[in-house]
Image (cartoon, rainbow, N blue to C red):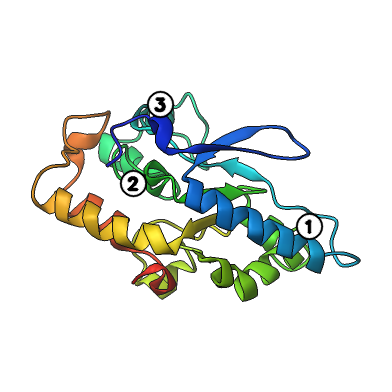
Amino acid sequence: MGDYNGGKVHKVFVNKIEKSSFRMRPDVMAAFQKMIEAYDKDRKGKSNEHIFVRSGFRSYADQKYIWETKFTGKRKMRESVEGKKPEEIVSLILQYSSAPGTSRHHWGTDIDINSFDNTYFEKGGKGEFLYSWLQENASKFGFCQPYNEYSKRGEKGYYLERWHWSYKPVSSKLEKEWQKAYQSKKIIIKGKFMGSNTMSDDLPLTYVTSVNTDCKE
């Protein structure tokens, strides 16, 4: 569940204006397109911001590349990795990025939209109306925000991500399947990528399962 390339199981979603393309499950894309249509009707005269995808399905190799470029400092984060111990770098990365093999983006059910900056979606931000609309309407199309306020998840898992939305009818089931596979050692994390040997056995499980209760079955 993660160490694969997606193959033919995903369809390609193309952003209408940006023309960039991303893969996702066919059922996810169908629901997402319906949600976009509903939002576009409701935003007329209220917001110029349309919904567009910034990230969809990611293969294990994709996630490993993101992880290791952050681990080595090639990809900038909110803090520099210089002078930090491996376990400190791991903790820093895990604020917003998943370890390879643990990302919900491996499942083809999760989408990042519009901006990776939470302030974009806050009051006064360009995406204020969009985020308010999603909070009220996304569930009608099967979508939920897995990483809501950190405090509401017992301060476990990733930090707040207002841009990340998940297709609950499928992802809630895949989360349970991932948990079973990991606990039965069908998914191996340690020794697979930089810094993985510093992780406790419970850490990947905590990050995968510490999501908004609205995203649970």
Left or right side of 30 for 196: left
Q: Position of residue 98 (x, y in %)?
A: 37, 44
Compared with 3, 43 (above or below) is below
15 or 46: nearer the eye? 15
N-terminal-most mark, 2 or 3: 3
- The image quadrant that residue 122 belongs to is bottom right
Q: Residue at x 63, y 72 (%)?
A: 137
Q: Position of residue 10 (x, y in %)?
A: 46, 38
Q: Which residue is mark 1?
A: 126
Mark 1: few, some, or many residues within 10 Å (few <14, many ≥20)?
some
174 or 129: nearer the eye? 174
- Please state, as top left, top right, bottom left or bottom right, where the N terminus lies in the image: top left
- Please state, as top left, top right, bottom left or bottom right, where the C terminus lies in the image: bottom left
Q: Which residue is mark 2?
A: 91
Q: Is residue 48 visible?
A: yes
Between marks 2 and 1, how big is the CA–CA gap? 31 Å
Compared with 112, 101 (above or below) is above
**Amino acid on which disc 1 is placed:** Lys
Mark 3: few, some, or many residues within 10 Å (few <14, many ≥20)?
some
Compared with 171, 56 (above or below) is above
Q: Which residue is mark 3?
A: 65
**Amino acid on which disc 3 is placed:** Tyr
Compared with 105, 168 (above or below) is below
- Find residue 13 and name its label: none
N-terminal-most mark, 3 or 1: 3
Between marks 3 and 1, how big is the CA–CA gap? 31 Å
Secondary structure under the numbered disc 2 in the rendered image: helix
Q: Residue at x 39, y 33 (%)?
A: 6
Q: Position of residue 100 (x, y in %)?
A: 32, 37
Mark 2: few, some, or many residues within 10 Å (few <14, many ≥20)?
few
Q: Position of residue 4 (x, y in %)?
A: 31, 31
